[in-house]
Image (tube, rainbow, N blue to C red):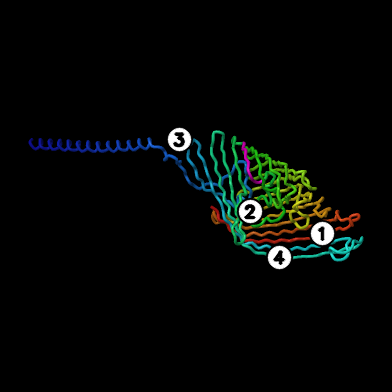
C-alpha cells in the first residue's frame, strides 16, 4: 500500500513538472509571435520604397509592336524577336506604371561588288572634234565606252531601339526612338536617327501618332518589303516613297487595319528612292493611306501616297504619286510567299547617269512588280529568293544648258537570294547574293543652241549595266 502511494505521488510530481515546462514553452512562443507581429506592423507602417524611388523589375520578353507603326521585314530580321523590359511599378504617389524596352544589334559584312557598264552616245549633226567645228545637217559622231570594276569591303552597322509606354487616364501614351551608325572602313560613323515616333492609343482600336517614320504608301510586301537583305536589295525595284515627317491616325480591329497620314512633301537631293530633287522642296504637303488585312494564312494591303510640288520652282515634273498592292501567303512555319505591284509618277533621277538632278527634275512614269519566296529549311536555317522588275519612262527633262529629253526609258531586272543560320536568337550568320541588270536609252536635243534647226544637234544615248553583289554577314543582337 505504501509503495502504491509513493508511485502516485511520483506520477503527480512528473505531471506538475511537465505542465510547468509546457507553460514555459507557450510563453516563449507567445513572445516570438508578439515580436513577429511588431516587425510586420513596422513594415506596413514604412513606405513601400525610399522617398524619391520607385520599384522596378528587369526581365526579358517579346519584341514590342508599337501601336500604329508596322514593322518592315528587314526590321524584323535585324532586331529579332526579343527585348529587355524595364517595368516601373506603380506606387502610392505614382498611380500609372511605365514600361521601357531596349534592344539593338551590331552587324558586319564582307561585301564584294562587281559593276559592268557598256554605253554609246551618238551625236547627230556634228562634224569635227567634240566641242569644236561646224554644224552640218547629216553628220554624226559616236562615242563608246565600257568599264568593269570590282570592289571588296568590310562594312558594319550599329543600331539601338528604345521604347517607353505609360498607361494614363486617357489611354496608353508612348514613344519609339531608334539610332543608327553605319561604318565603312576606318573612321567614326555619323550616328543619326532613322525613326522617332510618338503615339497615343485613345481607344483599344484608335491610335494617333506622329514623328519621322516610313510612309503608309510604302508596300511592305514583295522583294523590297519582305526580304532580310542585310547588304543586298541595291536595285531600283522597290515601291518605297521614302521616310518623312508625318502625323497619322490608325484604326485597327482584329485582322483589319486602316490608316491615313498627312506627310511633309519636302525633299532634298539624294533623299529617297524616287530620286527626289531640290526642285521638289516646297510649301506643299503630302498624304498617304493604307488598308490592310493580316491573317494566319493570307494577308494583303492596298496603299497610296501623293506629295505635292511647289509651283515656285522651275520644274517640268509632276507631283509624286503611287498606288500599289501587296499579297502574302503563309504555309505555317514551313514557307511563305510575298508579292507586290505598284505604279506611279513624279520627279526622278537623270535618265542615263542615274544621278540626282539637283535643279531640274525629269517627269517620270513607272510601274513594277516583285515577289519573294522564303522557306525554313530547319529550326535554325532560313532561305529566301526574290525577283523584281521596274520600267520607267521619262520626258520633259531640261537642264541649265537647255538639253532636253524625249522618250527616255530605264528598265531594270533584279534577282537576289540569301541563306541564314540562327543558332540562337542573339546571332545570325548568312550568305547573300544579288544580280541587277539595267538598260537605259534616251534622245536629247539642245533646245538652247541657236544653230539648232528642226530638232538638230541630237544625242542618242544607249547603255547597259550589270551589277553583282555577294556578301558574308553576321548579326549580333541584345
Question: Can you identify the residue that label 3 sits on?
Answer: 92
Along the horizontal axis of the image, is 261 left or right of 319? Answer: left
* Residue 256 marker: none
Classify 10 Å Cα crowding around label 1: few (below 14), some (14-19), many (20 and above): many
For the N terminus, the image quarter is top left
Q: Where in the figure is residue 384, as x and y percent of width and height?
A: 65, 55
User: What segment is highlighted magenta in the picture?
Assistant: 206-214
* Mark 1 vs mark 2, CA separation in Å: 36 Å
Which sits in the foreground, 148 or 412?
Answer: 148
In this rendering, the label closer to the viewer, 2 or 3: 3
Distance CA(mark 2)–CA(mark 3): 46 Å
Q: Residue at x 82, y 64 (%)?
A: 143
**What secondary structure is the stretch in magenta mostly built from?**
strand
Number of other residues with Cα within 10 Å of mark 2, as a class: few under 14, some 14 to 19, many 20 or more: many
Q: Is disc 4 in contact with disc 2, using a CB cutoff of under 8 Å?
A: no
Question: Which of the two discs, 4 and 2, sits closer to the camera?
Answer: 4
Amino acid at each position: 500500500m505504501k509503495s502504491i502511494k509513493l508511485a502516485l505521488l511520483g506520477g503527480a510530481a512528473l505531471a506538475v513538472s511537465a505542465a510547468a515546462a509546457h507553460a514555459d514553452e507557450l510563453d516563449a512562443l507567445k513572445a516570438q509571435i508578439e515580436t513577429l507581429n511588431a516587425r510586420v506592423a513596422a513594415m506596413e507602417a514604412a513606405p513601400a520604397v525610399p522617398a524619391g524611388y520607385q520599384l522596378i523589375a528587369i526581365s526579358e520578353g517579346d519584341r514590342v509592336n508599337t501601336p500604329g507603326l508596322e514593322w518592315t521585314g528587314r526590321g524584323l530580321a535585324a532586331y529579332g524577336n526579343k527585348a529587355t523590359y524595364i517595368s516601373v511599378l506603380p506606387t502610392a504617389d505614382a498611380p500609372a506604371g511605365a514600361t521601357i524596352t531596349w534592344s539593338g544589334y551590331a552587324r558586319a559584312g564582307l561585301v564584294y561588288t562587281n559593276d559592268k557598264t557598256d554605253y554609246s552616245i551618238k551625236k547627230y549633226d556634228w562634224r569635227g572634234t567634240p566641242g569644236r567645228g561646224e554644224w552640218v545637217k547629216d553628220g554624226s559622231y559616236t562615242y563608246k565606252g565600257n568599264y568593269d570594276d570590282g570592289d571588296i569591303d568590310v562594312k558594319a552597322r550599329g543600331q539601338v531601339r528604345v521604347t517607353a509606354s505609360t498607361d494614363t487616364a486617357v489611354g496608353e501614351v508612348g514613344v519609339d526612338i531608334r539610332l543608327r551608325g553605319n561604318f565603312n572602313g576606318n573612321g567614326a560613323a555619323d550616328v543619326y536617327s532613322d525613326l522617332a515616333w510618338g503615339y497615343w492609343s485613345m481607344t483599344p482600336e484608335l491610335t494617333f501618332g506622329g514623328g519621322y517614320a516610313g510612309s503608309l504608301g510604302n508596300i511592305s510586301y514583295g522583294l523590297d518589303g519582305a526580304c532580310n537583305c542585310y547588304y543586298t536589295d541595291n536595285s531600283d525595284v522597290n515601291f518605297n516613297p521614302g521616310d518623312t515627317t508625318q502625323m497619322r491616325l490608325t484604326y485597327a480591329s482584329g485582322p483589319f487595319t486602316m490608316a491615313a497620314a498627312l506627310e511633309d512633301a519636302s525633299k532634298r537631293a539624294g533623299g529617297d528612292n524616287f530620286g527626289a530633287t531640290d526642285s521638289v522642296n516646297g510649301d506643299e504637303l503630302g498624304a498617304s493611306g493604307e488598308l490592310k488585312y493580316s491573317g494566319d494564312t493570307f494577308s494583303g494591303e492596298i496603299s497610296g501616297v501623293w506629295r505635292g510640288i511647289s509651283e515656285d520652282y522651275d520644274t517640268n515634273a509632276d507631283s509624286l504619286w503611287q498606288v500599289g498592292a501587296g499579297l502574302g501567303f503563309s504555309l505555317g512555319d514551313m514557307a511563305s510567299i510575298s508579292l507586290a505591284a505598284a505604279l506611279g509618277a513624279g520627279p526622278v533621277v537623270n535618265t542615263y547617269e542615274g544621278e540626282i538632278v539637283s535643279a531640274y527634275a525629269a517627269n517620270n512614269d513607272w510601274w513594277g512588280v516583285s515577289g519573294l519566296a522564303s522557306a525554313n529549311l530547319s529550326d535554325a536555317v532560313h532561305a529566301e529568293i526574290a525577283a523584281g522588275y521596274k520600267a520607267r519612262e521619262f520626258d520633259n527633262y531640261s537642264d541649265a544648258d537647255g538639253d532636253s529629253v524625249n522618250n527616255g526609258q530605264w528598265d531594270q531586272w533584279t534577282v537576289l537570294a540569301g541563306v541564314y543560320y540562327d543558332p540562337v536568337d542573339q546571332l545570325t550568320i548568312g550568305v547573300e547574293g544579288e544580280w541587277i541588270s539595267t538598260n537605259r536609252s534616251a534622245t536629247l536635243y539642245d533646245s538652247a543652241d541657236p544653230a539648232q534647226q528642226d530638232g538638230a544637234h541630237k544625242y542618242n544615248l544607249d547603255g547597259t549595266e550589270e551589277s553583282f553583289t555577294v556578301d558574308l554577314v553576321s548579326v549580333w543582337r541584345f
